[in-house]
Image (cartoon, grey):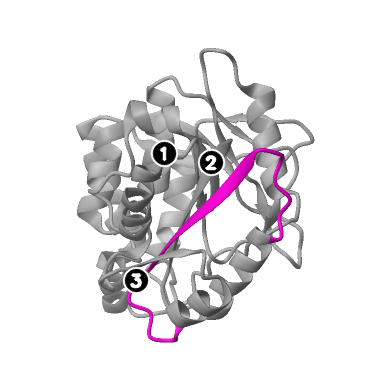
Amino acid sequence: MKRIAVLMTCHNRKENTIACLDRLLKNTLPANHTLNIFLVDDGSTDGTTQAVNERYPQVNVITGNGNLYWNGGMQLAWENALPHDADFFLWLNDDVELKENALETLLSTYETVRTDSIEPVIIGNLCDEKTGQLTYGGCTVDKGLFHFRARKLPVSDAVTACDTINGNVVLIPKSTVDRIGTLNKNFTHAMGDFDYGLRCTAAGIPIFSTAGFIGTCSNNSISNTWTDPTIPLKSRLEKLKLPTGLPPYEYFLYNKAHTHVFTATFLLITLYLKVLFPAAWVKFSNFIKGS
């Protein structure tokens, strides 16, 4: 029997959370596979826990302190799942709507590319429900002395090798956790998924994205965020430093871990330039792409 521990975290998105669980539990599983769901409710005030307990009492709901955000919530879910001896861990964001064969696709992709000595990490490609365009999936890394960025890989009809991951839907074998552990606690919200994928790559653990799409998920809007050039500078700086922004110290640690201290310092400076001069940043970033 193969056991899959599903890891989720949520905050005040009851309708999304229930819809995600509905789609997950309608999935067809290959024979001899079971699901065990670990959901962190990070301080929701909209009745999420009660709704989940009433509709799906089999879900393990863990109460967060309200300040965990994505990385912290997923880490807490993972810590609760570890004692249950799962063969796989499935990251799943609660704004994802899975196709009914999504789990079969993830597992069959894993079986297709695995070898006797290497167990891969598998990412599920997602698209916008209205446009059908790629939103989240596997990424390639473009690295140089003055830049370090992850770029989404286009979806194809074949399984695609990746450098790192968007963390919306990711199947991780237990052997990966045995080798590199779980999420990095240096990160609060963003960067934890990219960091984990890069740690996999550095450890020689291959990452592949599925052929085609396995579900839908809309892109996060930039409206009223630190990247929104229409809001005042003071607001952009405040929002940059929020856990849901791009906290500069965490951003520096992330880049330092995967590049060089010089590159990390340069990128920290350019982060502030992007906030201070959003229009000029577009021209500048186009220039440094060639460096």
Nearer to me, 116 or 138:
116
Query: What's under tag 1, amino acid-wise?
Result: Asp
**Given this view, does label 1 or label 3 mark the residue nearer the observer?**
1
The range drawn in magenta is 26-47
- Residue 95 seen: yes
The local crowd at label 1, few if under 14, some if 14 to 19, many if 20 or more residues have their Cα within 10 Å, is few
Q: In terms of sequence position, does the residue under pointer 1 or pointer 3 come before the other?
A: 3
Q: In terms of sequence position, does the residue under pointer 2 or pointer 3 come before the other?
A: 2
Residue 28 on the magenta span:
yes
Q: Which mark is residue 42?
A: 3
User: How far is disc 2 from disc 1 in space, using C-alphas?
Assistant: 8 Å
Q: Quadrant of the N terminus?
A: top right
Query: What's under tag 3, amino acid-wise?
Result: Asp
Residue 30 on the magenta span:
yes
| Circles 2, 1 touching at the beta carbon (< 8 Å) | yes
| Circles 1, 3 touching at the beta carbon (< 8 Å) | no
- Residue 143 seen: no
Residue assigned mark 1: 85
Nearer to me, 60 or 155:
60
Residue in the image at 70% along x and 56% along y = 215
Residue in the image at 63% along x and 45% along y = 124
Q: Quadrant of the C terminus?
A: top left
Q: Position of residue 102 (x, y in %)?
A: 70, 49
Query: What's under tag 2, amino acid-wise?
Result: Arg
Q: Which mark is residue 3?
A: 2
**Given this view, does label 2 or label 3 mark the residue nearer the observer?**
2
User: Dot 2 lies on which element?
Assistant: strand
Nearer to me, 165 or 176:
176
Q: In terms of sequence position, does the residue under pointer 2 or pointer 1 come before the other?
A: 2
The local crowd at label 2, few if under 14, some if 14 to 19, many if 20 or more residues have their Cα within 10 Å, is some
Q: 75 above or below 279?
A: above
